[in-house]
Image: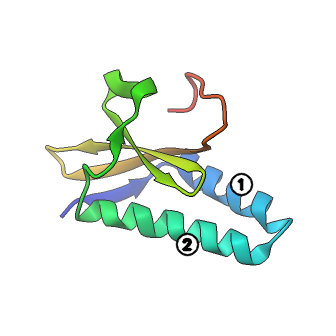
C-alpha cells in the first residue's frame, strides 16, 4: 500500500477551489472537494490508476480526472509514495510552474 503525500501547492489549490465554488454553492464545493479527496485516497491501493499526463510525461507525472479538475501526481515505486503535486481546472492553461 502506498503512502499519499499532498504537496503544499496542492493543499493550497484545493482550498482555493473550495473557496471559488463555495461562492456560488457551498453544497457543490463540499461535493467536489469530497470527490477529489476520495479519488486521491484510492491511490493508496492503486497508485498507477491515473493516466500519464502528456504535458509532463518526461517527469513521470500522472493525472486523475475528477469532475472538471486534473489532479497531478507522481508515484515513486522505490518508496511507495504518491505525491499529489497540483490540481488544475481542465480548461486552465498549464505552465512550467504548475508542477
Residue 54 image offset from top left, x and y in percent = 40, 27
Kindly indicate the quadrant of the structure image that contains residue 52.
Answer: top left
**Nearest to the observer: residue 67 or residue 20:** 67
**Nearest to the observer: residue 12 or residue 26:** 26
Quadrant (top left, top right, bottom left, bottom right) of the N terminus: bottom left
Q: How many marks?
A: 2
- The answer to whether residue 25 is left or right of residue 42 is right
Gap in Å between the C-alphas at discs 2 and 1?
Answer: 14 Å
Q: Residue furthest bottom?
A: 27
* Residue 82 numbered tag: none
Kindly indicate the quadrant of the structure image that contains residue 44.
Answer: bottom left
Q: Residue at the spot x=85%, y=66% of the render? A: 24
Residue 40 image offset from top left, x and y in percent = 41, 61
Residue 92 image offset from top left, x and y in percent = 66, 35
According to the image, label 2 marks what residue? 34
> From the viewer's perspective, is residue 44 above or below residue 57?
below
Q: Residues within 10 Å of mark 1 (few under 14, many from 20)?
A: few
Q: Earlier in the sequence, mark 2 or mark 1?
A: 1
Residue 47 image offset from top left, x and y in percent = 26, 54
Q: Residue at the spot x=71%, y=72% of the render? A: 28
> From the viewer's perspective, is residue 18 above or below residue 99?
below
Mark 2 residue element: helix
Mark 1 residue element: helix
According to the image, label 1 marks what residue? 16
- The answer to whether residue 40 is left or right of residue 3 is right
Amino acid at each position: 500500500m502506498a503512502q499519499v503525500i499532498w504537496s503544499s501547492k496542492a493543499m493550497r489549490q484545493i482550498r482555493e477551489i473550495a473557496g471559488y465554488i463555495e461562492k456560488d454553492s457551498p453544497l457543490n464545493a463540499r461535493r467536489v472537494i469530497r470527490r477529489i479527496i476520495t479519488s486521491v485516497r484510492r491511490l493508496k491501493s492503486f497508485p498507477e490508476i491515473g493516466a500519464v499526463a502528456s504535458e509532463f510525461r518526461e517527469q513521470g507525472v500522472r493525472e486523475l480526472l475528477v469532475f472538471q479538475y486534473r489532479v497531478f501526481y507522481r508515484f515513486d515505486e522505490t518508496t511507495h509514495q504518491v505525491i499529489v503535486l497540483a490540481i488544475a481546472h481542465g480548461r486552465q492553461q498549464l505552465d512550467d510552474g504548475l508542477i
